[in-house]
Amino acid sequence: MKIHIEPIPHAIGGWEVWVGLAEVRQLPGSDHKIELSGQGSFTWLTCWAKDVFSYEAKVSEVMTYYGLFIVELDDVMPFTTAEEKGIVTDELMEQFADTAKDEKVCLYGSFHNYPSDNAGQQARRPICNAYSLGK
């Protein structure tokens, strides 16, 4: 999913596409743009960032917009590092290509839901199925 957000104003130069695996859950309430079918979900997120802090700020803003909150972020790194580590799938590469076109967007891949907290502990490495829609 694509949402336009403004770059963090204090950062100048050094921006590149970053990737991370997010565990997300629903925020309280009923005004959710994304409904999860279980206790929580995992998804890969790509966005332009300067460092882990700017990445976390951007993806947190995006997930909040959709009625979700981030429980945990894993494997947060520049996309080039993810390629070097061999964790990039074809789907994640497609997500990267779409993200690279516009530094003001963040994209998420497929949500891999888990039905309970115990299941969430075991489902740490979903495969990304990237897609994007406008805001």
Image (spheres, rainbow, N blue to C red):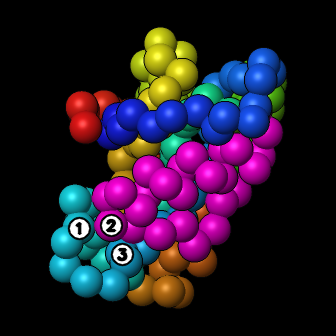
N-term-proximal mark, 3 vs 1: 3
Q: Residue 32: give its label.
A: 1
Q: Position of residue 68 (x, y in %)?
A: 39, 67
Q: Is residue 110 left or right of residue 135?
A: right
Quarter-of-image position of residue 70: bottom right
Tag 2 residue: 67
How many numbered discs sit on the rendered protein? 3
N-term-proximal mark, 2 vs 3: 3
Quarter-of-image position of residue 131: top left
Q: How far apart, in angstroms, are the residues tagged by discs 3 and 1?
A: 8 Å
Which class describes the residues within 10 Å of circle 3: few (<14), some (14-19), or many (20+)?
Answer: many
> Tag 2: residue type?
Gly
Foreground of the two, 115 or 109: 109
Tag 3 residue: 26
Foreground of the two, 53 or 92: 53
Q: Is residue 112 left or right of residue 103?
A: left
